[in-house]
Image: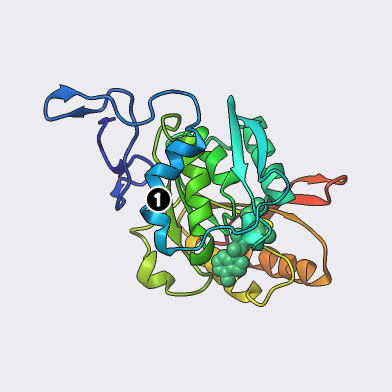
Amino acid sequence: MEQSSSVCPAVGLELPGRQKESKDMKQDGETQAVEGTSDEALTDEQVMAGEAQDRRNIWEPSFYYSLGKESFHFAGHDISIRESMDTFGALIWPGAIALCEFLENNQQQMNLMDKAVIEIGAGTGLLSIVASLLGAWVTATDLPDVLSNLTFNIRQNTRGRSRYAPQVAALSWGQDLDRDFPCPSFHYSYVLAADVVYHHQFLDELLDTMRHFCRPGSGTTILWANKIRFQSDLRFTEGFRSSFNTVLLTELPQQGVRIYKATAKE
Ligand SMILES: C[S@@+](CC[C@H](N)C(=O)[O-])C[C@H]1O[C@@H](n2cnc3c(N)ncnc32)[C@H](O)[C@@H]1O
């Protein structure tokens, strides 16, 4: 594989803005060190300095929960996630942790290496970070107002560590999908979704978004982890099961989390 290629090996298509990270990326005939080649996470100061410009005009958490950080260890790396009480998308939810554990423990069954992966409702980015550290070519998406914190967490935890630099993009469920993520140019092997089903108004749009990325003939697999809380969660699950071929991969009774795998009905 070409070190500087932006062609996703899983789909054979040029994906905008995607760059493979390499410790020895060659440019203009010379071997140049690229930013963040250390296995250490960047310090807050490094990340914040690099993003000062980006963050000048966009939302960032105003109130930090507890010490403001949660720590994890997945895929051989310490991961530090910045949280906030400002929005649902700035907290880590149990579905994300459960799916990270599942992916780490089932790498043969769900091999993400060199696969194109999109996460919808990525929130703090923990799941996208773990998918990236497991070798996937990740696009993390969410509503525009949480992208700043999502980008911060992803950069801090993947720079210099991941095979491919993850991308962050706005994606509001059901909106402008044919314009912003047209098929087949935007084809993903996996769609990841964690705790995207709870008490909100966009459950139909969420299912439409899953259908958009997981079409007959696409070979796409959805991995959806959710804590089941409300009756509406069960109604969504019924719609999900009738839209796709589904398998309940695991159920974690203590956390109340179920993890489903789904493929398109041909
Ligand atoms: C409960 S949080 C889960 C966050 C993360 N996946 C996790 O498990 O930690 C739900 C996420 O869905 C996002 N979300 C809610 N409504 C959305 C919509 N209409 N379009 C896109 N994302 C949405 C929120 O911003 C939030 O990040």
Quadrant observed for ligand 1 in the rendered image = bottom right
Q: Is mark 1 within 8 Å of ligand 1?
A: no
Q: Can I make out residue 220 in this image?
A: no
Q: Residue 235: give x, y in percent of width and height.
A: 76, 71
**Observer-nearest residue: 132 or 89?**
89
Q: In this view of the protein, which residue sits in the foreground, 157 or 69?
A: 69
Residue 90 spot, x, y in % from top left = 62, 56
Q: Is residue 129 left or right of residue 163?
A: right
Check the image and report above or below for 3 versus 156: above
Give the camera-side residue of 157 and 22.
157
Residue 69 vs 257, above or below: the answer is: above
Q: Quadrant of residue 62?
A: bottom right
Q: Give the residue type at disc 1.
A: Ala
Residue density around tag 1, few if under 14, some if 14–19, many if 20 or more, within 10 Å: few
Provide the secondary structure element on which disc 1 rests: loop
Q: How many marks?
A: 1
In the rendered image, which quarter is residue 86 located in?
bottom right
Q: Which residue is mark 1?
A: 52
Between 19 and 69, the one lying in front of the other is 69
Q: Residue at x 44, y 53 (%)?
A: 168
Mark yes or no: residue 87 visible. yes
Which quarter shows the N terminus? top left
Residue at 33% across, 28% down: 22
Could you tell me which residue is drawn at 47 percent across and 36 percent down?
Answer: 158
Q: Is residue 171 above or below residue 107?
A: below
x then y, percent, for residue 230: 82, 67
